[in-house]
Image: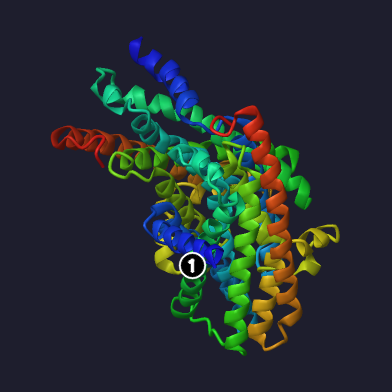
Amino acid sequence: MSTLRLVLVTWWLQLKIRSRSAFDGLLGLLWPLFFATTIFLMYRASGAEGSALLSAAVGASVMGIWSATSTSASFTLQQERRQGTLELLVAAPTPFPLLIFPVTLSMATVGAYSMIATLLWGRFVFGIEIAVANPLAFVLSTLVTVVGIGMLGFLLAISTVRYRSAWAIGAALEIPVWLICGFLIPLQVLPVWVRPIAWLLAPTWGMSAIRAAAEGRGVLADLLACIALAIAYGFIGMLVSRHMLNSARRRATLALS
Amino acid sequence: MSSLRIFLIGGLTSYRALFTWLTPWILIPSFILGPIFQILFFAYVGRTAGVGSDSFFLIGNAVLYASIPCLFAMSNTIGGERQHGTLPLLLASPAHRIPLFLGRALPVIINGFGVSAVALVVGALLLQVPLPLASLAPLALVVAVATFSCTGLGLVTAALALRVRETAVLANVVFGILMIFAGVNVPLDALPSWMGSVAAWLPLTHGIAAAREVAAGASLVSIRTDLLVEAGLGALYIGIGLAMLAWFEREARRRATLETI
């Protein structure tokens, strides 16, 4: 019960902090809109309409969830280091991963705002008909995708805890995930060797579930794959954090790395 | 002589000190991987949507990425000074402002040119876009002019950094505007007319158009209008940037708001 409370309170607190930050709040909304606008204009120039436009709108909207998470997640521990609170978090009796997960979940939640904003942008500025065949499955798939992306951000944050310039790695991972997770580009179009990498990424399955819900197809298999990967990221994150923090404590480099 | 020293040595020192992206941990992801992945992303989106060609997206995005150092490094010339507590010292110094700020732009132009060149070469290899040997020298000239022009816009963002604390957000927003308006991924004639009108006054628009023509085999003579307009816009933005810097500096002194915004 106390764990659930910790996750919820931290998530809510971090969400409030982020919504007041120009980088996470304002840019978190605007940045995906820049890309979505470009993509909508590209599709309009190609003369696409109907399901192709809807598919592009849904894909572009989910891009924002990952955008809000990738750079911010990799930067979050550096931010704690700058504020002098990283050592306190590490020294706290609560397991370190449990403190970081709600932080990255709050980032993905900001991304969900941007998803809604992108869909509204597509509807009212570009006139794209947002006809979701199964709204309940769509919302459920979105929630699972937010958690899946939050967990991927958690793994990213934990893995880069010792790197001062981790934000650049997170920023560099933003577009590759857009590229290979089927947000806009079908996996079949990409080289064969890319597909196994995509299958190991939760956003691939989350995106597939959201698209399936929008088109009225079944979502269960995709959702289960997304959840399984999110759990796997959690376990890997715990192991990595133990290794990284032990190493940092042993060398006394937590604040310096 | 003092102005020349401020321009060359001061500019280089400032670039090395303030633009904290020169570590390989930032430089490689931001200046090499970032543009290459964006080129691949839009080339594949273009293929999926059935619009444009690989060459179109390669050139548009490679030239666009020159703006990353142009915008971020120039913003850092003010934001970085403020962060390190040296902005009042800088502005209290008797150094002439024109060599002071233009000197900071010179390394940025070279940096931007390098980013575009690497993105063009690697992107062309990955997407197997042929760039004729004869087009490489004119292409380099066009990219250099586009980078100069974008650095002018960077000087404007540097001036705005005297009023805006979130310089990273500011630079990202300007980058996003350039990406949508400057004909990077959407042909100018496919944009709404008002967007086309705005694009004509933005740096990179004419440079990207000229780069595409040169890559398709056009001579320098045939693209001279675009090239001259691009260079002219660069000069215009530099003028506006210097004027804004002078104005905001005066205002900041008058209101004592240099470090309080």
Where is mark 1, residue-wise? A114
Q: Which amino acid does label 1 sit on?
A: Ser
Residue A34 location (% of width, % of height)? 49, 61
Question: Which residue is farthest top?
Answer: B1
Say whether residue B73 is left or right of residue B136: left
Tell me if residue A138 can be seen: yes
Q: Does B55 appear above or below B49? A: above
At 62% from the left and 89% from the top, the residue drawn is: A134
Residue B63 location (% of width, % of height)? 58, 45
Camera-side residue: A99 or B46? A99
At 55% from the left and 48% from the top, the residue drawn is: A93
Q: What element carries label 1?
A: helix
Chain under disc 1: A
Question: Which residue is farthest left?
Answer: B254
Q: Does A230 appear above or below B56? A: below
Q: Does B193 appear above or below B3? A: below
Residue count near mark 1 (Cα–Cα under 10 Å), binned few <14, some 14–19, many ≥20: many
At 23% from the left and 38% from the top, the residue drawn is: B248
Residue A50 location (% of width, % of height)? 61, 85
Tell me if residue A132 can be seen: no
At 20% from the left and 36% from the top, the residue drawn is: B252
Camera-side residue: A147 or A185? A147
